Every structure is written in C-alpha cells, then in structure tokens.
C-alpha cells in the first residue's frame, strides 16, 4: 500500500513540476504533441458522446426547413469559423487551433445529430466554440443542426439564396 501511495504522490509531484515549469508551449502556432492530440481527441469525443447520449432527437427533425432565419443565424454566428459553401478561409478560421470543422466540406452525417446539438448548445472549452444555448432556444439549435448537416450538399448559390431568405 505504501508503494502505491508513494507512486501516486510521485506522479502528482512530477505532473505539478511539469505544469509549473512552463515547458509545454500552449501557443496556437505550436501544434500539440502527438500523444497530447490523441488524448484531447479522446477526451472531447467521449465527453460529448456521454453528455449527448440521453438527448432526444425531435421526431420531426427532417421536416424542419433549415433555411431563412436559420441560414442567417449560421451566416452571422458560425460562418466566420466554420465557413460556408464557396467561402474562402477567414483569418479567424486560419488562426484557430484546433481548426474548426468546415461543414460544407465534411462527410454527410459525420457526427450524430445529438452530438452536434450538445456542442452547439454547450460549446467546447479552449476551442473558441461558444455555448449558443445561452442565447438561443432548443428549437433554433435543432434547426442549426439540420442546416449544418445539409451544408455539404449546398452550392455557394444555394447557400446565398438561403441566407437572403429566398
């Protein structure tokens, strides 16, 4: 038992010294170590899946239009980071690390609707992804989930038409 306590305390001290030393560069211009990337990826995916697993997807989710106000919301809230069909990379998108996904270039249904809902509503720490649930209703967030899922099928013209309310 003493060996276990000694080992745990030693690991704690080494971890604290590592953190206190400042040796790990947190600059967005310096990529994570491979192992750090893997651990963060696992942490993010498992955290989202665990919190989203009890979210009930509305039965009429496919019936929502995902246009008009939703397209304008995406344009104003999301496109600067996640871009839009036909849109070139913005300075903000390029400057973020990790890089935010570009939904118009992502595989259809890459993420579960519940996961996307949870992320949009709650945000993700240390990524620049805000928690839109503080200012938007669940219905507005579900509409964004649908819209995002359909972005990879939209042309630049269709996107602009949706944003302009057409």
Image (spheres, helix red, strand yellow):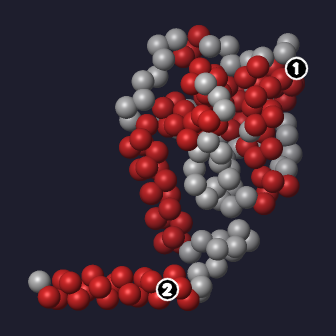
Quadrant hosting residue 145: top right
Which label sits on residue 164?
Answer: 1
Secondary element type, mark 1: loop
Q: Which residue is mark 2?
A: 18
Residue 83: x percent and y percent?
A: 78, 41
**Going from the N terminus, do you reach mark 2 or mark 1 first?**
2
Residue occupying image coordinates x 80% and y 32%: 75
Q: CA distance from mark 2 to mark 1?
A: 52 Å
Is 29 located above or below residue 80 in the figure? below
Figure check: 41 above or below 152: below
Foreground mark, 2 or 1, reads: 2
The quarter in which the C terminus is drawn is: top right
Q: Quadrant of the N terminus?
A: bottom left
Label 1 packing within 10 angstroms: few (<14), some (14-19), many (20+): few
Residue at x-position 17% and y-position 88% = 3
Instruction: Give the quadrant of residue 78.
Output: top right
Direction front: furthest residue? 134
Q: Position of residue 102 (x, y in %)?
A: 70, 43
Asked whether 90 or 125 is in front, the reply is 125
**Residue at position x 70%, y 73% in the image:** 27
Q: Is residue 55 left or right of residue 154?
A: left
85 or 119, nearer to the observer: 119
Q: Is residue 77 left or right of residue 165?
A: left
Element under label 2? helix
Tell me which residue sits at (81%, 34%) in the image: 76
- Image vertical order of residue 28 relative to residue 3, above or below: above
Q: Tell me if residue 117 can be seen.
A: yes
Q: Please state if 26 lies on the left or on the right of 90 as rendered.
A: left
Above or below for 120 versus 22: above
Find residue 143 and report its horizontal and vertical position in percent.
Answer: 63, 22
């Amino acid at each position: 038992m003493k060996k276990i306590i000694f080992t745990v305390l030693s690991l704690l001290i080494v971890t604290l010294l590592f953190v206190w030393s400042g040796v790990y560069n947190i600059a967005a211009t310096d990529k994570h170590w491979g192992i750090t990337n893997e651990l963060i990826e696992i942490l993010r995916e498992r955290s989202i899946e665990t919190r989203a697993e009890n979210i009930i997807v509305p039965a009429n989710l496919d019936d929502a239009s995902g246009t008009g106000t939703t397209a304008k919301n995406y344009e104003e809230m999301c496109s600067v980071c996640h871009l839009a069909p036909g849109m070139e990379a913005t300075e903000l998108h390029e400057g973020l690390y990790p890089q935010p996904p570009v939904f118009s270039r992502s595989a259809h249904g890459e993420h579960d609707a519940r996961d996307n809902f949870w992320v949009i509503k709650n945000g993700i720490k240390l990524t620049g992804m805000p928690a839109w649930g503080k200012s938007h209703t669940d219905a507005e967030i579900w509409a964004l989930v649908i819209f995002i899922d359909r972005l990879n099928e939209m042309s630049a013209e269709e996107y602009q038409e949706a944003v302009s309310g057409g």
